[in-house]
Amino acid sequence: MIGPSRVAELDMPSAGIETGGSRPAQSYWNESWERLRANRIGVGAGALILVFAAIAIMAPLVSAFITHYQPQTINLDQTFAKPGSVHWLGSDELGRDTLTRLVWGARVSLGVAFLTVAISLTVGTSVGMLAGYYGGWIDDVLMRLVDTVLAIPAIFLFILMSILFRPNPFTLAVIVASVGWGAVARLVRGEVLSVKQRDFVLATRSIGARDTRLMARHLLPNVLPVLIVAASLGVGQIILVEAALDFLGLGIQPPTASWGNMLTNAESYFFRSGWLVALPGVTIFTTVLASNIFGNAVRDAFDPRLKS
Amino acid sequence: MILAKYLARRFFASVIVVLGVTLITLLLMDRTRGTYVPGIDLNPSLRPEDIARLRANLGLDRPFYIWYLTWIWGVLHGDFGRSMIDGSTVMSHILDRLPNTIELTATAILVGILISIPVGVVSALRRGSKTDHTLTVVSVAGFAVPQFWLGLMLILIFSVTLEQHGLPWLPSSGAYSAYNGGDLLDRLLHLIMPATVLSFFYVSTWSRFIRSSMLEVLSQDYIRTARAKGMSERRVVYLHGLRNALIPLITLIGLELPGLVSGGLVVEVVFGWPGIGKLAFERALQYDYTTVMGVTFFATMLVIAGNLLADLLYGVLDPRIRYG
């Protein structure tokens, strides 16, 4: 990787390199990794996300051994329970355990978020790479398409699409990614346009590398830092969008628990239990906050040029 | 001359984008219209030929592309068609809701600007101080708060809890009271919570932006020159610094123009605010696709106008920008 590391090296006194007293030469990836590890708050936030993800994956075990409730078990004797020893975080209007539902909801929310990022990156990178590399009419067509998609107010597109496809976690990810890929494509195209000008591309081509090889083996690694940054900054926003769609009734449908649709339900029982409104929101907030902090840390580590 | 050329190119690009947007919207709506006649397909007393006649009245028997061309032709003549639900014109629906939406969004943007500029400037001037750290933490946290949840919490606290304790409480829904309401005070009371939620979002975005923009400007040579010639710090910061630091904010606010329609949608739904976003949301759920098409078209025009306006203002305010 040429760009960022060269900027960092320019700042170092040249004398330090000659005396050999400086740190050994490191690859861009090593350096970035070191920078990321040095950021304690960032690492903490990343660890929190991992813990949430682990809990989400192990939701059935949590149900069986820790909370002893299933997310959809109705118990009409224990509706609107306050947080306590029976229901740690209380229960809802049907006596369903809130903690258990939050844990199962994490599966949906985090799962959809990661899937959305994966789809956006794959589609966006392909489109941006093709547009930036080939230029000309291919660039024009693809970028006008991106302009069009990004010009529709995203929420309208989400509403229309979720009416069209009955949302489950997979279609929901596709729906949210249908907007997300556009921004990625623009980003990747910009990077490819600048990397394309470098000498090594000419050199690679002159020894007979085909377009596909050039793109996959030489351009992609150079675009990767931008993608990593975009991905880690995107997760938090996607969780918010997904929760909002669930809340509007356009996302995951009850009785499947998701952080967003737990709030739709709670809205009807304001007067009975404020807990039902507060808890899912706090969960969303914590997760998004951790993702954003981690995303910022990743950006600072992988792309020092962007540091604010 | 260069500007004229630039504008012409932007115009043609915009036309393509608008056509693309309407086509995508209609394609999405079209998939649902095959079986659609409002509420009537559930009516067992209607014969098939009645349903066919009703469909024909709404233009649903015509092929997709004819419908689209007719619609475009109408739009070019300022006719957005009639709602499929209630038969009144789409334009009258939009004009009906527009003042409410503008009231909410304009208030939120204004409050957003008034709070975020001082916050951003203070953060930048006291970079690294406790104040700066606190403000940073608050705005990073502000990013992570789900808008609709913030709205629900405000309702829970300021409407539900206050009312339960017999205290004066804020109205939780609508833009004005239906009975003996509608005066200025009543409207303001209704505006407080939705505008707070919406401006909260603007403040956390813009204050960070102003901070970094201010820091960048303050490190420029002309600031050093101003200081070197003995200008007072206050004049340096406000006359040279802030004026230049605010230029990029114009872009942000220009990009917020489409937020007039879509940005407040979730807030409008939470607070039952009778605005355009809520209109689009309700009508989409009822498959009223003429209304949805109309609002989407309107919103897209705002996106394009906002982008263009931001670019042009940017050039006016910053002569270093050239259009190529």
Image (tube, helix red, strand yellow):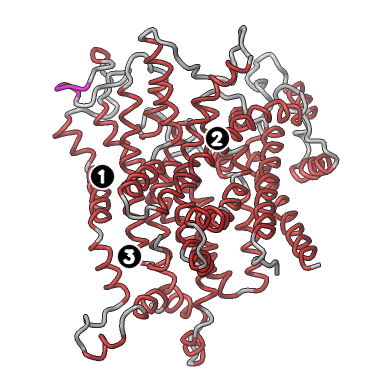
Give the labeled residue for mark 3: A301
Q: Amino acid at mark 2?
A: Ala
Q: Is B313 located above or below residue A263 in the figure? A: below
Q: Is B226 located above or below residue B22 in the figure? A: below
User: Residues in magenta?
Assistant: A83-87
Q: What's the chain of the residue with tag 3? A: A
Residue situated furthest front in the rendering: B230
Q: What's the chain of the residue with tag 1? A: A
Kindly identify the residue that appears in the image at 26 percent across and 79 percent down: A26
Discs 3, 2 touching: Cβ within 8 Å: no
| Residue nearest the observer in this picture, A257 or B147 | B147
Helix, strand or loop status at disc 1: helix
Q: Quadrant of the N terminus of chain A?
A: bottom left
Q: Is residue B313 magenta?
A: no
| Lower sequence index among marks 1 and 3 | 1
Query: Horizontal and vertical percent for residue A221?
Result: 40, 74
Crowding at dot 2, Cα within 10 Å, few <14 / some 14-19 / many 20+, comes out as many
Give the labeled residue for mark 2: B108
Between the residue at mark 3 and the residue at mark 2, the CA separation in whole angstroms equals 35 Å
- Are the residues under badges 1 and 3 in a single subunit? yes
Kindly identify the residue that appears in the image at 48 percent across and 76 percent down: A215
Kindly identify the residue that appears in the image at 76 percent across and 27 percent down: B92
Label number found at residue B71: none
Q: Amino acid at mark 3?
A: Ala
Helix, strand or loop status at disc 2: helix
